[in-house]
């Protein structure tokens, strides 16, 4: 079983050099259309009440997703939330405890991984060390019975797309980490699968290479057009890559939406604080009937929320929606200053409290130091209110 899966489930690596793509020329794009994906082999992916249990522990609970063909969906959440388990169940590497999984119109719960027509890219290399780059790219195609001439054309097209054509005669030990990753990714792409699964392929790259690779991955998907599910714990990757984001926590879906909706209309406190860097500020306040009391201070209530006097809520506001100046509606004291080049991040504690902190952003030209007292004004159109118990959004 292991050898048969390895021929059809493709892997990439957790290297230090990362994946690097070259922009596809028009000629190469036509070659890809004709040789690699002549019929644009895409498929919808549907999960219907999928669960995964290990003994008495439920790792995944009632996951329902309907991913249209050709779209790029990102599963994001903290470590241990179950996102990789979902990917492995789709690939056929993890048993489904209950629910139904469909790729296209076919229910695949009981279909082995080698027959699901998916390609998966993990964090690790899985190149055959005794084979050349060309042989690694061609291996899965040979196992599927493709003719030699077709294999050669497809290998060449993939190699040119990923800028590894000059490496086709080399062995994996002669490649850098980034080159090995490109070969592993190319082996997956060469199969022209119905579904492409990527499990944190950028997690160990340096910051600059990660930024470059994100952009190239998005361009690559727009050209190849394969239905793609991408797993990451990095919310920046999720925001920049996804057509739709699925936010997970503790094995359950918290919210599904496009990046803008996820960011501006978080379904609950977990989504609000996980998505965004720095995250949304969450302040424990009491509605007085005319404002929000925080410690000894009262913020004006300009949003028209339907609340009861003395009702406790959590007020959410993102750092970029806070006006910072010498005076304002809320007094704070700066406890940390982090210059980032184009802006300065501040950490401040609300005056007359010991444990209520906010993240703030100010222009790089603004002079701020630890100990300064500042005044804040919140944009009322950007305020969210959350239930302090369950965390669900109450407003807007």
Image: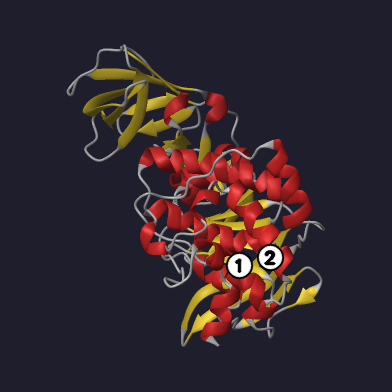
| 242 on left or right of 33 | left
Which residue is located at x 59 percent, y 34 percent? Answer: 305
Q: Which residue is mark 1?
A: 138
Q: In this figure, which residue is indicated by the disc labeled 2?
A: 151
Is label 1 in a helix, a strand or a loop?
Answer: helix
Among the two numbered marks 2 and 1 on one chain, the one whose residue lies closer to the N terminus: 1
Total residue callouts: 2
The tag on residue 215 is none
**Residue 8, horizontal then vertical, whole percent:** 60, 74
Q: Are marks 2 and 1 in contact (CB under 8 Å)?
A: yes
Q: Position of residue 207 (x, y in %)?
A: 37, 40
Left or right: 96, with 312 as reference point: right
Which residue occupies the foreground of this view, 144 or 365?
144
The one nearer the camera, 17 or 52, is 17
In this picture, residue 98 sits left or right of residue 204:
right
Residue shown at the point (58%, 76%) measured from the top left: 7
125 shown above or below 340: below
Image coordinates for residue 231, horizontal then vertical, percent: 52, 58
The residue located at (50%, 23%) in the rendering is 379
């Amino acid at each position: 079983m292991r050898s048969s899966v390895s021929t059809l489930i493709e892997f990439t690596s957790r290297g230090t050099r990362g994946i690097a793509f070259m922009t596809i020329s028009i000629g190469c794009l036509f070659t890809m259309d004709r040789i690699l994906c002549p019929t644009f082999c895409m498929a919808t992916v549907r999960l219907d009440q999928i669960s995964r249990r290990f003994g008495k522990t439920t790792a995944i609970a009632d996951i329902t997703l309907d991913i249209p063909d050709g779209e790029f969906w990102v599963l994001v959440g903290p470590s241990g939330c179950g996102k990789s388990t979902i990917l492995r169940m789709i690939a056929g590497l993890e048993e489904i405890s209950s629910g139904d999984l469909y790729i296209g119109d076919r229910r695949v719960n009981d279909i082995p991984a080698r027959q699901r027509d998916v390609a998966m890219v993990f964090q690790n290399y899985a190149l055959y060390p005794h084979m050349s780059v060309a042989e690694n790219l061609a291996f899965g195609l040979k196992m599927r019975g493709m003719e030699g001439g077709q294999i050669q054309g497809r290998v060449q097209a993939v190699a040119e797309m990923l800028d590894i054509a000059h490496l086709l005669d080399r062995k994996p030990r002669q490649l850098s980490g980034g080159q090995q990753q490109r070969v592993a990714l190319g082996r997956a792409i060469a199969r022209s699968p119905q579904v492409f699964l990527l499990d944190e392929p950028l997690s160990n790259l340096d910051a600059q290479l990660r930024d470059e690779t994100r952009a190239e991955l998005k361009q690559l998907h727009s050209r190849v057009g394969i239905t793609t599910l991408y797993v990451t714990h990095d919310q920046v990757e999720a925001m920049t890559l996804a057509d739709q984001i699925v936010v997970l926590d503790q094995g359950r879906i918290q919210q599904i939406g496009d990046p803008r909706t996820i960011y501006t209309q978080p379904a609950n406190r977990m989504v609000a604080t996980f998505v965004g860097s720095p995250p949304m500020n969450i302040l424990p306040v009491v509605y007085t009937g005319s404002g929000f009391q925080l410690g000894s201070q009262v913020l004006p209530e300009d949003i028209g929320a339907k609340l009861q006097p003395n009702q406790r809520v959590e007020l959410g506001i993102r750092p970029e929606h806070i006006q910072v100046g010498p005076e304002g509606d809320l007094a704070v004291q700066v406890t940390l200053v982090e210059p980032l080049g184009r802006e300065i991040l501040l950490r401040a504690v609300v005056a007359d409290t010991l444990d209520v902190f906010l993240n703030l952003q100010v222009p790089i030209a603004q002079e701020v130091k630890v100990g300064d007292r500042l005044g804040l004004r919140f944009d009322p159109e950007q305020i969210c209110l959350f239930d302090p118990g369950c965390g669900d959004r109450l407003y807007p």
